Image (tube, grey):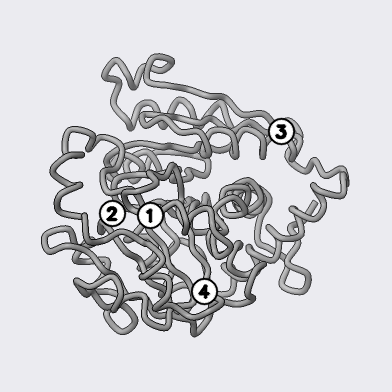
Amino acid sequence: MVRHFLTLLDLRPGEPERLLERAAELKRMHRAGTPHAPLRQRTLAMLFEKSSTRTRVSFEAGMTQLGGHALFLSPRDTQLGRGEPVEDSARVLSRMVDAIMIRTFAHATVERFAAYSQVPVINGLTDRFHPCQLLADMQTYRECRGSIRGCRVAFIGDGNNMCNSYINAARVFDFSLAIACPEGFEPDAATITAASDRCTVVRDPQMAAADADLVVTDVWASMGQESEQAARRAVFGGFKVDAAVMARARPKALFMHCLPAHRGEEVSAEVIDGPQSVVWEEAENRLHAQKALLELLLLGALDDRTGSAPE
């Protein structure tokens, strides 16, 4: 049966930690120059309705490193951009490639595409979820501090796709999550209700950051919300992650941001460029976590004993 990765909840019990182990192994192999090309003759189609630096480069480089090939397709390059039904594009593309990554606006688009695709579909970002980024974040925390199980995480800012994905991550990776957001900018109601045993919403960033092991933020206005930038800046002015907020977290707390970042808005320069920030490792780990994900979806279940995928 074809497997898709539309949210973190698509991972089966035991797979999240093994996937992170495999990502770490692939990272070590890459840095050591160890040849590893299990995806020879495999092609990944990458559909972009939303542009991106990290998503495109990490998936394209990842497929190359695994011996495969990636096709970049913007709205100008496909009939989707001219009104072809999502279902028809899914039927056609999935007969020609081995996997499809979609970065789009409406989450319903990837759900409809997956329903009609014969090959794995990966959510590269939608307005509701950004699960690939969370794999990288969890890998980064693991390599810096060990398991995140039982830890405290603070998400400060807009209840957007990153926030929704952190809520799912709290369920999948077993940590508690405090969300600080302005009234009216809460995360998806159904998503947070399903995780009510481990997630809380507050209005004070310092309260959310208290005793946190990890502090996370994102831009105040996501792609497609540029016209709201000025209004959101006024609303979110008190939700900046600065030194005062980080001082409420634990001494060894880490700071993460999925990037791109606006220094002086959602995060101060002293925090994102400071010693607690791991944003560059986090960005690099998109590459390695997604390679592990591609192996999982295209080659089968991860090995229970070693965390490695079959050759």
Residue at 39% across, 14% down? 76
Residue at 82% across, 52% down? 29
Left or right of 284: which side holds 7? left
Q: Residues within 10 Å of mark 3 (few under 14, many from 20)?
A: some
Sequence order check, earlier mark of 2 and 1: 2
Location of mark 2 (residue): 160
Q: Nearer the viewer, mark 4 or mark 2?
A: 4
Above or below 224: residue 177: below
Sequence order check, earlier mark of 3 and 4: 3
Location of mark 1 (residue): 267
Element assignment for label 2: loop
Q: Amino acid at mark 2?
A: Asn
- Residue 7, picture quadrant: bottom left
Location of mark 3 (residue): 64
Q: Amino acid at mark 1?
A: Val
Between 286 and 310, the one nearer to me in the picture: 286
Between 1 and 152, the one nearer to me in the picture: 152
Sequence order check, earlier mark of 1 and 4: 4
Q: Are marks 4 and 2 in contact (CB under 8 Å)?
A: no
Location of mark 4 (residue): 253
Sequence order check, earlier mark of 3 and 1: 3
Element assignment for label 4: loop
Residue 51: image tag: none
